Amino acid sequence: MKVIQLGASVTASNEKDAERLRAKMKAGGTLLINVMSSAGAGKTTLLSRIIRDMPHTSIAVMEADIESDVDAVRIESLGAKAIQVHTGGMCHMDAGMTAAAVEAMDANADLIFLENVGNLICPAEYDTGAGKNLMILSVPEGDDKPLKYPLMFGKSDALVISKLDALPYFTFDVQRCIARVKKLNADIKIFPVSAKTGEGMQALEDWLCERMAEWQQS
Amino acid sequence: MHEMGIVLHLAKTLDETAATEHLTAIGKVVLQVGEVSGIMTDLFTDCWDYFKGRHAVLKNSTLVIEQIPAVTYCDNCKGTYATVKYGKECPYCHSGETWLLKGNECIIKEIEAE
Ligand SMILES: Nc1nc2c(ncn2[C@@H]2O[C@H](COP(=O)(O)OP(=O)(O)O)[C@@H](O)[C@H]2O)c(=O)[nH]1
Ligand SMILES: [Mg+2]
Ligand SMILES: [Zn+2]
């Protein structure tokens, strides 16, 4: 037997699958956005609001869940195309599962959101093949989360600080949170919003439109 | 379960490596696992022994796990310290503005193969 030095990531084969999916989505002009947060941070609520606010954009949603399908039903009730992906006990979506879901959904959309499994650790470790990564941190979770989960904050292109309407009831310092996140990731775009009142949504939706335009031309 | 996901990816990665390198059998697989990666070593090797049978090149493989120490960075005094010993609070300046620098990884260091 010979010894082969690899020094490779355990998920090296996933990274290849991810690059393949990204290239395919790019060629088709569809922007895939991976949405990550802990359970209950407001992913489905935020996506529902975006679908209602952007009626002229064709949006589809892939709901990853360990087993239920309530979120896909919520999205479909708004008239957007949705597909439920069961991860079979897995705590994250990987690129192979994402590619299979994109295929199965067969949506002719400009924008596809992948609502990843709700936790701040595992989804950050797997490249799904998405064009952009967006994470949500909700006010009730606390402004110390960037210190506890640096990987996800470091890998995201955008951070939505959600449930801003709940600020009076929690000790959450938005400026301190932003400063902590910027130290981990200087380029990240940060959007404090409330999906309930609509505060801050316009800036986030403008960012989505710019990213879609950029994805389709370059 | 976290371990199962990693095991499936590891098996797929090694299977693809075997194909590109023209390997017929893989023996020892040395993994470097961070001290705070959350990977439970026993559970991981049990999972491995269960799944390796699905790939012909891996069926006689054994997993060897080496630990990488976890290191935390303190943004206040710019120092670094052992995560497992001191936790979230910096032992030098007692600041809580700290985050993990290293110790979360899972890397395939080397394999024995023919
Ligand atoms: N006050 C407030 N509650 C919200 C907001 N967004 C979501 N929620 C609530 O948070 C809970 C979890 O939301 P959901 O969208 O299902 O979270 P998910 O698990 O991340 O998809 C629900 O009870 C929502 O009504 C918000 O902007 N403000
Ligand atoms: Mg949801
Ligand atoms: Zn310190």
Image (cartoon, coloured by chain):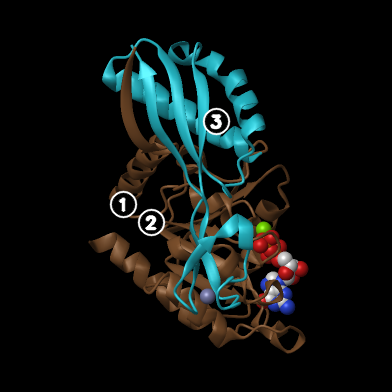
Chain colours: A brown, B cyan
Please tell me whether residue B56 is drawn above or below residue A201 in the rendered image.
above
Residue shown at the point (41%, 25%) measured from the top left: B14
A181 with respect to A84 (left or right):
left
Specify the subunit that label 1 lies on.
A
Residue shown at the point (58%, 71%) measured from the top left: B90
Residue shown at the point (58%, 24%) measured from the top left: B48
Tell me whether marks 3 and 1 sit on the same chain.
no
Mark 3 near mark 1, Cβ–Cβ under 8 Å? no
Q: Label 3, on which residue?
A: B7
Disc 3 secondary structure class: helix
Residue shown at the point (35%, 38%) measured from the top left: A16
Q: Nearer the viewer, residue B60 or A80?
A: B60
Q: Label 2, on which residue?
A: A131
On residue A26, the disc is 1
Please tell me whether residue A40 is drawn above or below residue B69 in the rendered image.
below
Residue B42 figure quarter:
top right
Q: Residue at the front extreme?
A: B92
Quarter containing ligand 1? bottom right
A84 with respect to A132 (left or right):
right
